[in-house]
Amino acid sequence: MPRRATPLNPKDGPKARFALALRGLRDQAGFDAKSIEAIAAENHMPKSTLYAAMRGERIPSRDVLAALVRAWGGDEAEWTKRRTETEDEVERLRLVKLKAPTAGVPPMRLDRHDDTAMLMLTGQQWLHGEERAPLMETPAKSLQAAAGRRLARLRAEETIASSSRGELLKQLQSQQTMSAVWDVLRRQAGAPTVRQIAQATGEAHGSVASVLNGELQSHRAIESVYGYLVARRDELAHGRSLSEAADAY
């Protein structure tokens, strides 16, 4: 018996819309459309990977997308372009979410001494999913989440400031869930987009996104992204130093 399709709504976001479009392509293939199981077997791919793409849980890799599109008679070039557009939309939404102020939460000065205790109290449950508090009213939840993000950023800044480049690179290569450190490094480098980083490093778009999300990838990808961000950060800092020196005259 075929699996029942997971309900999707276009309002759920770009991944959901992409998955719905893939389902539409499959439907257009009619009764002769190959099953996910058949496509997985022919291309030596895990069924779970293909189903994740069809459920909108992730944007399929280029290889997975090509296998699906070929099986259902789609245009590979068109779908590759659509995939890139979807990745860009996901990235734009991520950046908007990072930059958007938290509703109902006044700007806070993050002091490394006075505010740390408060942030620990309000943010630790946000940082650790297994310790999350029961659902609260929206303003309280917003405050808790904002405090958690600030605490994570504070810890990341301290990690970067207190570690040599070699030590920090080793930590990034040996630990997952380092997204806060990557966020700070990226901000310090002028907030380049995933596409800019991928073009500059020669790494795949998906690999760069996984690195920045704190998901452990190959050491080469981590080293490439890290090297690019540090070099760009140093260039920006050097440029500011020259500007300040000029202003002094």
Image (cartoon, helix red, strand yellow):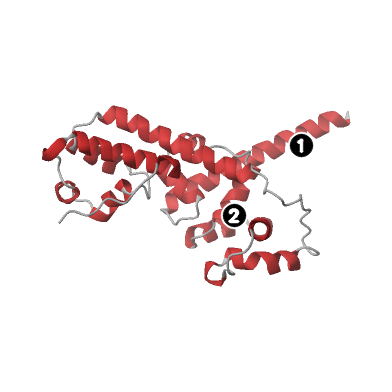
Measured as percent of width and height from the top left, residue 118 is found at: 74, 66
Residue 118 to residue 105: above or below = below
Please indicate whether residue 59 sits to the left or right of residue 131 in the image: left
State the residue position of label 1. Answer: 241
Secondary structure under tag 2 reads helix
Q: Which of 145 and 138 is in front in this view?
A: 138
Please indicate whether residue 229 sits to the left or right of residue 116 in the image: left
- Looking at the picture, which amino acid does disc 1 mark? Ser
Measured as percent of width and height from the top left, residue 67 is found at: 22, 40
Q: Nearer the viewer, residue 223 or 69?
A: 69
Q: Can residue 247 be seen in this view?
A: yes
- Residue depicted at x 57% and y 41%: 95
- Looking at the picture, which amino acid does disc 2 mark? Val
State the residue position of label 2. Answer: 181
Instruction: Say whether disc 2 or disc 1 marks the residue closer to the N-terminus.
Output: 2
Measured as percent of width and height from the top left, residue 206 is found at: 41, 44
Q: How crowded is mark 2: few (under 14 residues within 10 Å), some or many (20 or more)?
A: many
Residue 18 to residue 118: above or below = above
Location of residue 158 (image quadrant): bottom right
- Residue depicted at x 33% and y 43%: 61
- Residue depicted at x 59% and y 49%: 183
Please indicate whether residue 57 sits to the left or right of residue 223 in the image: left
